[in-house]
Image (cartoon, helix red, strand yellow):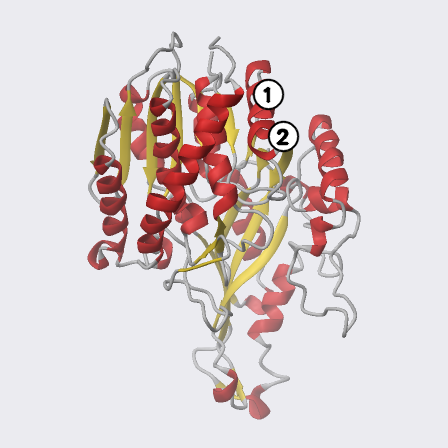
Amino acid sequence: MNAPVRAEESAALAAYADEAWDQRIVPALTDYIGVPAKSPMFDADWARHGYLDRVVRDAAAWVESRKLPGLKLEVVRLEGRTPLIFFELAASGSASKDTVLLYGHLDKQPEFNGWRSDLGPWTPKYESGLLYGRGGADDGYAVYAAITALEALKAQNLPHPRCVGVIESCEESGSSDLPIYLEALKPRLGQVGLVVCLDSGAGNYDQLWLTTSLRGMVSGVLKVEILSEGIHSGDASGLVPSSFRILRHVLDRLEDSATGRLLPQSFHCELPASRLEQARATAAILKDEVWKRMPWACGADGGPTLPTTTDPVEGLLNRTWRPTLSVTGVDGFPELKNAGNVLRPYTAFKLSLRLPPLVDGNEASLKLKALLEDNAPYNARVTFHPDGRAGALGATGWNAPELAPWLEHALNSASSAYFGAPLGYVGQGGTIPLMSMLQKGFPQAQMMVCGVLGPKSNAHGPNEFLHVPYGKKLTAAVAQVITACP
């Protein structure tokens, strides 16, 4: 094992990360935020628009401009697929035979509404250490932070194993292109011993947080058609069943609307005892901030809007180990200003079904389709079209392997060095399809899954921001963990 990082070396890594973020990373991310590089699911003409190609080219050019000794970079392009950056850095001063794989993505979620009047998804603004705009925190910063961490090690002449980077541009569409690329790159990945994924979140900004699990997801469009065209509601209502009522009826098969509990037992899984123990420890740190951090509609004046539970432990488990249904989009409805007295011919909902980490996403997708489509009320035309490609219609979640003693020690040391606090453990409710893919491909690999998405950062929503001070400390922590690899 490499020698422990000394206090003066930690200070030097932190100073390097600080300077890099201020002088190079924030300017690069400011340019990146200004590009509407939406993921293919949200921009069917992504290839013609060229935004994904642009952010990939810009990131690749930035990396190459750093002239990191020994680093090789390639933009890999497979026919009909989104582009991907692959870089490789040979080991230096390390006897480790393993490879460290660093992961991030450059595609973005769509605009959404509700942005502060002086902000916007494609109009970056740096204010009080927060960089506002779509994609900076999720996950544009990752490639810049990863390269900076490696640069910091080189600058201090600290040893590191062989490192490779995979920066994709399809993650927000379920990483549907990534398995093809991983198969093509498999001979070049090497023996992966540690995965550093910088696409996750933080429970607070006061310590380093390790993600211990991720939920899976099935998304798609549920559509109910009852008429071939809209007709006068006074003439037809009571005789023609409402497509919205039918849709509600169909969703009742899936969800208890009074509690939000998903009814099919196949969408649930058993909670590991170790994850319950960690949730209790995390709840003791975060307390009521688990739920108070949300932007509730009713505050002190109107009486507080309450979550599904005010128990911090149950709240953490609800958002990480239990299935939930969200409706994220609708079709078939006119704008309110154009809503006349018309019985609409169809109603369509975009569904987002979050799955517990141990439930297979593809199997869940098939079961969900059968549940929603079979025996349609009133013999209406009910269809559910899952997102993704055949054979990969749902994203499977991930439960981290048992933490190796060396990594646990390295993470705690890094958290203490840069935050002055111990490592925190937290499950995340989102999905990173790569993690389950890598777990299958490299079952012996250790996983450092972390990120800058802490309280109020609001990924995918309005006023998304990147907490730059946290990003600086995380970058230095990544460097320290890499040099600790046995």
Which mark, by number, is residue 181?
none
Q: Residue at 50% of width from left, 88% of height from top?
A: 337
- Residue reaching furthest to the front: 8
Q: Earlier in the sequence, mark 2 or mark 1?
A: 1
Q: Locate residue 209, reporting x and y percent.
A: 59, 35
Residue on which disc 1 sits: 408
- Could you say which is closer to the camera, residue 183 or residue 255? 183
Residue 365 visible in this rendered orientation of the protein: no
Q: Is residue 67 left or right of residue 451?
A: left
Q: Is residue 410 left or right of residue 42?
A: right
Q: Locate residue 7, reporting x and y percent.
A: 53, 21
Instruction: Tell how many labels.
Output: 2
Assign a secondary structure to mark 2: loop
In space, the residues marked 2 and 1 are separated at their CA atoms by 9 Å
Q: Is residue 144 above or below residue 401?
A: below
Asked if disc 2 and disc 1 are in contact, CB closer than 8 Å, the reply is: yes
Residue on which disc 2 sits: 423
Characterize the local packing of mark 1: few (<14), some (14-19) or many (20 or more) Cα atoms within 10 angstroms.
some
Q: Locate residue 84, reporting x and y percent.
A: 28, 39
Q: Amino acid at mark 1?
A: Glu
Q: Residue at 69% of width from left, 31% of height from top?
A: 275
Assign a secondary structure to mark 1: helix
Q: Is residue 267 left or right of residue 73?
A: right
Q: Quadrant of residue 228?
A: bottom left
- Could you say which is closer to the camera, residue 240 or residue 177? 177
Q: Is residue 419 left or right of residue 287?
A: left
Q: Amino acid at mark 2?
A: Leu
- Could you say which is closer to the camera, residue 81 or residue 91? 91
Q: Locate residue 112, reporting x and y percent.
A: 46, 65
